[in-house]
Amino acid sequence: MRDTAMRDARAFVVSATDVEEFRNLINGEWMQSSSKQPFDNANPADSTDIVGRFQASTAADAGLAVDAASAAFEAWKKTSVSKRAAILNRAADHLEAHADRIAREVTREMGKALNLARDEVLRSAQTLRFYAVEGQSLTGEVFPNDDADMTVYTLREPLGVVSIITPWNFPISIPARKIAPALITGNTVVFKPSSDAPLSGYRLAEALAVAGLPKGVLNFITGKAGEIGAAITEPPVIRAISFTGSTAAGEHICRSVRFTTRTQMELGGKNPLIVMDDADLDQAVDLTVKGGLSLAGQACTGTSRVLVMKQVRAEFTAKLVAKVKALKIGSGLAAGMDMGPLATAKQLETVLRYIAIGRREATLLCGGERLTGAGYDGGYYVSPAIFTDVTQQMTIAREEIFGPVIAIIEVDSYADAIAKANDTEYGLSAAIVTRNPRVMQDFANDIQSGTVKINRTTTGNLINAPFGGLKRSSTSTFRESGRTGLEFYTQIKTVYRGT
Ligand code: NAD
């Protein structure tokens, strides 16, 4: 389908109003939705800039995507793993060749700085290459037994049709880390990106189509969760769902699907960073700003609570406020900006609502204003808010805000810090800043968190290491990333082979 897919995609993208219209990819064809009503995807740095027009798909469209994935499964399962790997590598070539253009699109549709967007596109290509290699050495086990004429071993085989549902904050790398292991292990996919950043996912689907993925193996469909969510999660033919998004949506999906549908849910967080009294305070400030604000606080692993020892609280806080006040806020496309806009109007509203709650509950030290005026009008800009005198019971200490809001909580011992850090329903990422090796070791053991960082930001994770949360941050069924990322997409058969 390689050449046809590209030709068709190009033929359909230009609409009469100069805003490109992007279609669904179903059974190898770039198709309009039966609703014939596209929706607009706006630039959060300037909401009058329409990045693209996407299909407001219906349940009927979603049904076609599921049927196409189902029909393609047997042949894809039988396709040799080296052929599957070659397709992933060619898709990686495509992403790398177009990295600059795709990075600009990522920035235009969700606001992150251009250098971060470029890193994300290249990381997505690297993820495809990683699974092209790693997927080729996925093995079963052989078991000793007493019968000299029998060999007992396990086979790992693909599940079937997998639904992949993703958020807007890492709009190409999260889809890549799910789609690559799904495809290399022989599954077929229905992929629904967030309606707030669908173009990045489209580019990934396009790269795989250009790379020669057979029709129906990957189906890309856009639209509202309320319209198509059930159609891509509830049919019995859907053998697995890999979802990244809010805890509320993940829990809803888990409750609505069959017990035989495997789920992998990577959800929200309320990530703490502990600053011990022996910490390098400049490093602690740096880690807080990078972890808490680099994506305007919109990383699932972003630092949102800073638990600081009372001996160093005043000095740490003064340094933090000075650094935050000096940050440059502006469009991700402009050079030298430290923080971009929030990704959507809804995000802006949510973040301003939490800031208003924080003003009533705690002490606002800086920021927390909607930014207006030249360069800001039409965009969803907020100055980063630092709150102090925050206590455990406060809303801003308990709920995921997902914005540039940092809560400083005083602690008086390591034990107090751990108790407060763990006093949350979430468990995605947690960090500590200390020079004490004993405390480092204890922290790794004591903290209830899927990712543990010592003198590093709460954000960031490797392609080749497992990633996922604990508690209400994840179903904790299977981890993403690395070799473990392949396990979710395969099932085990145990074979007893006599002579
Ligand atoms: P969201 O839950 O609103 O949406 C995520 C995706 O799920 C979107 O594509 C959405 O359309 C879809 N969706 C929502 N309800 C659905 C349903 N009932 N059926 C099928 N699909 C449905 O989340 P968001 O606002 O896009 O992203 C922000 C959230 O994602 C935050 O809570 C953040 O912590 C979380 N997140 C988690 C991780 C992680 O790895 N743990 C990574 C990034 C983001």
Image (tube, rainbow, N blue to C red):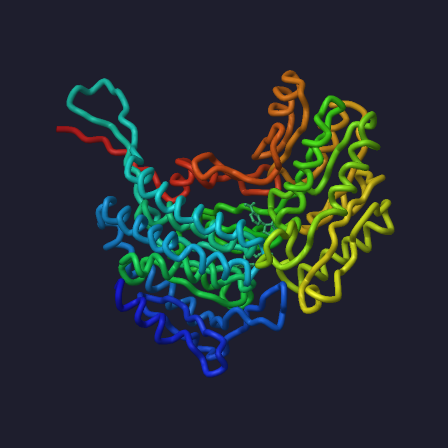
Q: Which of 185 and 305 is in front in this view?
A: 305
Could you say which quadrant of the image residue 49 lies in?
A: bottom right
Residue ranking furthest to the bottom: 16
Work out whether residue 254 can be spotted: no
Q: Which residue lies furthest to the left in this view?
A: 499
What residue do we see at 38% from left, 54% from top?
Answer: 95
Count of number-bearing discs:
0
Residue 448 location, x and y as percent? 63, 31
Query: Residue drawn 49% across and 59% down?
Result: 193
Which picture quadrant has residue 129?
Answer: top left
Q: Horizontal placement of 337 versus 87: left or right?
A: right
Residue 217 seen = yes
Quarter the C terminus occupies: top left
Residue 437 versus residue 153 in the image, above or below: above
Q: Where is residue 311 in the image (x, y as percent from the top left)?
A: 83, 25
Q: Say which quadrant the N terminus sits in.
A: bottom left
Picture quadrant of residue 27: bottom left
| Residue visible at 47% across and 50% down in the picture | 173
Of the four image quadrants, the one with ligand 1 is bottom right
Left or right, residue 73 beside residue 358:
left
Looking at the image, which residue sits at the far top? 438
Residue placed furthest toward the front: 335
